[in-house]
Amino acid sequence: MTEEKQKQLEGFLKENDVLIVDKSGSTKRSLIKVLVDLGAETRRIHSVTHYDEAMEVFEEKRPQLVISDYYIGGSSGFVFFQDIRKKYPEMKKLVLTLITSNASQTVVAKAAEEDVDSYILKPYNVDTLQRILSVAILEKNFPSDYLKYIQSGKEYLFDGKFEEAKNEFEAAISCTKKPSLALFYHGQAMFFLNETEQAEKDYNKGLSYNKIHFKCLLGLYNLYNELSRTNDAYSVAKNITRYFPSNQERLCNVIRLCVETSSFEDMEEFYLIYKEIEVREGVLTNYLNAGLFVTAKHFIAEQELERALEHFQWLTTVSQRASKYLRAIIIELYKIGEFEEARKFLKKFDVDDMKSDDYKIAAFYAEFDQLNDNMRVQSGLEIFRSESRTPECFQILIDSLKEQKMDDKVVRLLEEARDFWPDNKFAA
């Protein structure tokens, strides 16, 4: 490193705060030592272990250098980088460095161009750490022509000057042999100019240099959504979800697209991804619950009972044995005469839920094959006279009464039922 660059590096570290996000105490200590040796002041180096703490420190101190492990408490370093980029777009000199522990994470870091400025692969030594941090800091603060053209183009893009932006990105493309990032932004400009076919070509060309380039994949996904090309959108979204730490909103959309495209074979993969997320939002849990239920019904229709039961089991785990889902599962099993399996799920009800309407109805279905005619009628009447009445249970009650030739009672109950379900025509 030249003397001039050494001074530039020391000046950057001396003047700015640094944030380290890592669960390992030894890693944090070694990073602090290297940073101090490079010129940082100890009082300006902050270290935390969890996403929430990292966001709090960032909002308070506005560090210009953030070093994060791939896995952090509550999220991932990659997601944390995305969130602060989105929240603080004005911090153009911000340097984000990801610490990775295996080759697959390194591939992700390479593919996340611009979201990750540099990456450090474990195990590393002091010299490697110094070199990588030095290059990242200097490149960000004293960028190449390629990055200057991209930055200039982005400013035009954000100002709505799409033709000018396109010209800057074309200049950037000519500066390097693998211009995936420039092609992504050129595609963005083309999209805003309503040249969607060219935008698609740009994103795909960017992916030809790096097949999992994060921004190019995201550009394609958004483009296909805009054009209502559902199958294409799902194919791209699945790749994003597979390679990159999951954004929960995007994972919701992937689950939705999985169902819309009838790609039920993939639902297990999304369940496994969900399990790895430490802090899950309620809306994601709801999406997965619905996805697992629909997928299980699909496998029932395909006469693949074992796979259906497996998805129902996962549903009880994700929903934490919520009574409404247990009831729904038992009703589906009743429909195909799987009473033994239905009773297994009936046992999953929490003790506190055994007085609930959901339990009463679930028990009626699960134990139906063990009830004689009188018991079926009695149980059906109890449900009909309660607040937990449903038209499905009522139809079973009517059928049971008909089997016992109690036609007068059928007529009376049908009259009563019109008060509850005026638009429902029951088979009498």
Image (tube, grey):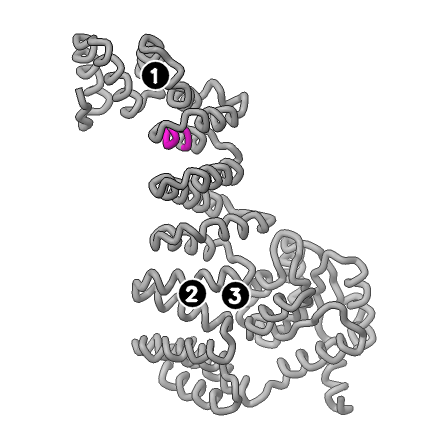
Residue density around tag 1, few if under 14, some if 14–19, many if 20 or more, within 10 Å: many
Q: Which residue is mark 1?
A: 383
On-image quarter of the N terminus: bottom right
Can I make out residue 184 in this image? yes
Residue 54 part of the magenta-drawn span: no
> How far separated are the C-alphas under marks 1 and 2?
48 Å
Query: Residue drawn at (47%, 82%), measured in percent from left and top?
Result: 182
Question: So how many labels did they put on this image?
Answer: 3
Relative side of 29 to 424, left or right? right
Residue 236 is marked as: 2
Q: Residue at x 61, y 75 (%)?
A: 117
Report the magenta stretch's main SS.
helix
Q: Which mark is residue 297?
A: none
Please say if the residues under marks 1 and 2 sit with CB atoms less than 8 Å apart: no
Real-space Cα distance between discs 3 and 1? 53 Å
Image position of 144 (left or right of 304):
right
- Image coords of residue 87 (percent x, y): 53, 64
Towards the viewer: 230 or 58: 230
Q: State the SS at label 2.
A: helix
**What residue is shown with label 3?**
86
Instruction: Work out whether 142 lies above or below 388.
Output: below
* 295 or 349, nearer to the observer: 295
Q: Secondary structure at mark 1?
A: helix
Q: Nearer the viewer, mark 3 or mark 2?
A: 2
Q: Amino acid at mark 1?
A: Ile
Magenta stretch, residue numbers: 329-333
Q: Are marks 3 and 1 in contact (CB under 8 Å)?
A: no
Question: Within 10 Å of the Cα at label 2, are there few (<14), some (14-19), or many (20+) other Cα atoms?
Answer: many
N-terminal of the two: label 3 or label 2?
Answer: 3
Type of amino acid at the residue the image marks with label 2 = Val
Res. 158 image quadrant: bottom left
